Image: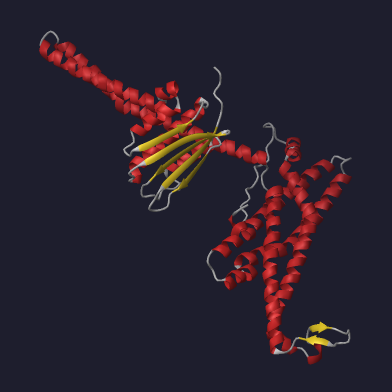
Amino acid sequence: MNTVADGSRQEVASGRPLWRSAALVAVGPRTLREGAHLLLNFPVALAAFVAAVTMLSLSAGLLVTFVGLPLLCLTLVAARGFGFVERARARGLLGSAVADPAPLRRRDDRRGLFPWMGSVLRSGQCWRSTVYAVMHLPWALITFSAVVVLWSAGFSAVAYPLWFWTLPEGNRPGINVDGQGGGWVWDSPGEVVLVVVAGAVTLWLAGWLIRGMAVVDRLLVSGLLGPSSDEQRVRQLETGRSTVADSSAADLRRIERDLHDGAQARLVALAMDLGLAKEKLSEDPEEAARMVDAAHGEVKLALRELRELARGIHPAILTDRGLGPALSAVASRCTVPVRVEVDLTERPAPAIEGIAYYTVSELLQNVSKHSRASGAVLDVWRVEDRLLLRVEDDGVGGAGTDRGSGLAGLSERLSAVDGRLTVSSPVGGPTTVSAVLPWRERSAG
């Protein structure tokens, strides 16, 4: 679910002494925060239940009038607002990062009461929040009762040495055997220690129970108060569209800059040189011939720059021969020796093929510029409906997808097409960067 949910396993495997791990489970910061959340469940859930049931009953009874439907919509919106409070409480006490849902949207730009009511009644988030407000009370009562009973018993038993002597001898706690006060009275030093141990064990067990109940609370909050899978998919697509648009705009600016500063400037100079050669053709044929020869060299350079620019836009070798030869050509230009292994029996869709090509190109550029490696390996293969790429080098390591880095931008581009980038690069190396892309079949045309 999130990193907090795995805390207990990390505590056991972290190398701490056993007693310290047990103390963290019993009264550690995480247990106290989650216990406070479970204690607050009942008063919060009771208030939400009373308000939701009252408003729903009132609006249902008034549906035959013109007041009932607007009142029902107000109830749904209030439940949605309650969801914001519960998500904030879960973030603060449970460490559960549940995203807020998208704002209410009308189907058109019309304003007024009826379009607003339509958007509220169509909102799955409003209805799920209402279900949460009604159904959470029984679970909240269970969590509240369990925490109150276990913490009361545990803390009072641990603190037993501080208060047992304040009671008269006949009224000290213990185990009553015959119903008339006869039995085991906990008043000797050894028995006091046993009570403290029993209280500590109770708190330890309560800690595990609290963590388990907190997991259920996280599931309830994320399942009923978080965005639905459709909303998450829409957000992902919107983010991906923005990333693709930004990348396309950056590529267009790069192409424009390369044309303006490179080939265009060279062609302008070439035109000027040919103009001067034309003027000197009758006066000084030898000088004109020399200038034409120099212009011929400039033409070759301009053609080479245009070919490199075209290859940067979409290499012809990729279109004609596929990923294997194209990636081998990229690897041959890397300053680090690269062993290429491409295991593909067929070609993916051109869009996926292009993304794979530019992903490998950027990764090998990083190897050339930053890795200080003596060698690298490029693997490309297919697993079911996924295309997998892996670049591994024996360099100095330290690469990451921190914001602002080239790998971060590459990860965003891949996520725009449902891809994924993972980086393993400890300091000192080696570095392994893996990319996963969806496999899309090539159209017959």
Q: Is residue 382 left or right of residue 394?
A: right
Percent x, y for residue 38? 71, 62
Q: From this viewpoint, is residue 397 visible?
A: yes
Q: Quick one: 420 or 295, which is closer to the camera? A: 420
Q: Is residue 131 left or right of residue 322?
A: right
Q: Which residue is the extreme one toward the bottom?
A: 169
* Above or below, 180 relative to 56: below
Percent x, y for residue 39? 72, 65
* Above or below, 21 relative to 283: below
Q: Is residue 366 left or right of residue 6?
A: left
Corner quadrant of residue 104: top right
Percent x, y for residue 411? 49, 41
Q: Quick one: 442 or 135, which is closer to the camera? A: 442
Residue at x 71% of width, y 60% of height: 213
Residue at x 41% of width, y 31% of height: 327
Residue at x 83% of width, y 48% of height: 56
